[in-house]
Image (cartoon, rainbow, N blue to C red):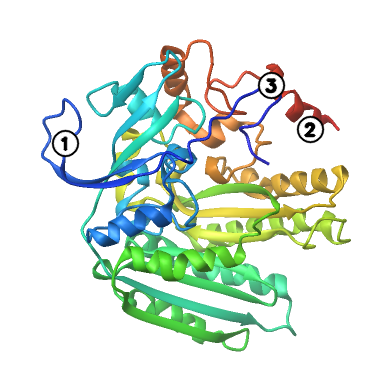
Amino acid sequence: MGRSAGPSSLQILTHNLKGVVYVADFVPQRSSVAPVPALTISAGSQLEEIYAVAEANDVSVVLGTCLTVGAAGGFIQGGGVSSLTPTYGLAVDHLLEVEIVTADGVIRTINAVQDPDLFWAVRGGGAGSWGIVISITLAALPPTAVSTSSLVIEPDPAQDLRTLAVNFITLLGKYQNQITNAGVSTALGFNEGNYSLSFSWPARHASVALFYPLYDELRTLSSNYTVLSNFTQEFVYPSVATAIVEHFGPAADSVIAYGSSTELGSRYVPQSMLESLGSVQSIAEAIWEGLEIASAPLRDYPAGIPKPQVGLSIFGDVPAATRHRVNETGANPGAYDAAWHVLYTGTWTVGASRSAYQTLSRAVYDAVGPLTALGMMSSYQNEGSAWEVNWQEAFFGHKYDRLLQIKHKYDPTNFFTTYKGVGFAPNSAFYSCYEAYQKA
């Protein structure tokens, strides 16, 4: 359920604004900084097109995994997470310039010296609130090979599966801060009957030796878990673009339910919550309790609900490398403090009744409740729930007041508006359908 639709509203299609240009010595307008290599990306350009240009010019860029996503839209305006984020930061940490049409009809080129407040806000302050982005310019990084380690693990079906799942999350949590701070991206998913655990990193930034303590401890638990496969190899992909296009992109496509509607709920887990074994255990219990809460209403397979269980993924795609730069962008401060990004996912298809998809959406939102009860309020807005009650805190944290001031300066009539985005007006007729949906 998105946050950018409403009766009598207008959405602007920028898909046909295509073009990716490599600039070897880019300098933002009116800036005196040293030139850097960069990619200028038109609003309609998708990741697959961008990675092709990056590969042709032997550079890396901090962008996402799903190849059909447009880089200049909600991805970058929500912060932009990447498999490179633990090493290099969020995509917005590398944004140099934006061409944008603001509510007064002015085409502005904004950067650190031209409309710097608006530039700060656009870098993570939420999509749909600031104007129509025409293009972005993103710093290009040196080329790097990519290393990976991917395991498929089967818990013993004769034992209590809940206990095994919680203990496995706890096991990973014991090592997560060290892994994240070494610049390694993590993904843990729970499939039918097994877990998939994968790590990836720019090859020269870490070694597989980093994982030896985790894997050695896993071996001692062989009576509880069986490692069905382990593919670990350094320098396995010659470039970031190759890794994304040939492996990570197709892997993401294999689990995304294209053509269905999706409900998401998420929470950031701070590194401070993974510093003691007792705290890690509490977090693991809360994560699994959330999955149980969300899945309970779906066990009877309501029509149009393809799975009787909500999906759960735990990502370590957080900006450890740029934690000290948290206030340089409008992105959620919770991202910079995090070790984990916990994501619950539910889908429904044609044939789902109103009651069925309302049940699903409520279930996914309720899933974050146990983590919220432990004090975790921050959510990645691009993968967050539209039904967040304390949405200012969840999506924007302490930056909301400054974002709102900037919104009033550049868009005083709230011409650009989105549900629970900066400047959201709860009583607007645009959002009557959301309110009716919640009350039904």
- Against 307, residue 217 (above or below) is below
Hey, which quadrant is residue 292 in on the image? bottom right
Name the amino acid type tagged 1: Val
Secondary structure at badge 3 equals loop
Name the amino acid type tagged 2: Gln
The residue at the point 60 percent across, 25 percent down is: 10
Name the amino acid type tagged 3: Ser
The residue at the point 33 percent across, 64 percent down is: 240
- Write down the residue under mark 3: 8
Q: Position of residue 100 (x, y in %)?
A: 38, 27
Q: How many marks?
A: 3
Q: Nearer the viewer, residue 414 or 11?
A: 11
Q: Nearer the viewer, residue 314 or 111?
A: 111
CA gap, disc 2 and disc 1: 48 Å
**The disc label shown at residue 71, or none:** none
Front: mark 2 or 1: 1
Circle 2 crowding by C-alpha within 10 Å: few under 14, some 14–19, many from 20: few
Secondary structure at badge 2 equals helix
Q: Position of residue 305 (x, y in %)?
A: 80, 57
CA gap, disc 2 and disc 3: 20 Å
Q: As drawn, is 275 to the left or to the right of 300?
A: left
Q: Position of residue 413 (x, y in %)?
A: 53, 11
Hey, which quadrant is residue 83 in on the image? bottom left
Residue 262 seen anywhere in this rendered image of the structure: yes
- Write down the residue under mark 2: 438
Circle 3 crowding by C-alpha within 10 Å: few under 14, some 14–19, many from 20: few
- Against 404, residue 35 (above or below) is below
Could you tell which of marks 1 and 3 lies nearer the N-terminus? Answer: 3
Secondary structure at badge 1 equals loop
The residue at the point 29 percent across, 57 percent down is: 54
- Write down the residue under mark 1: 27
Front: mark 1 or 3: 3
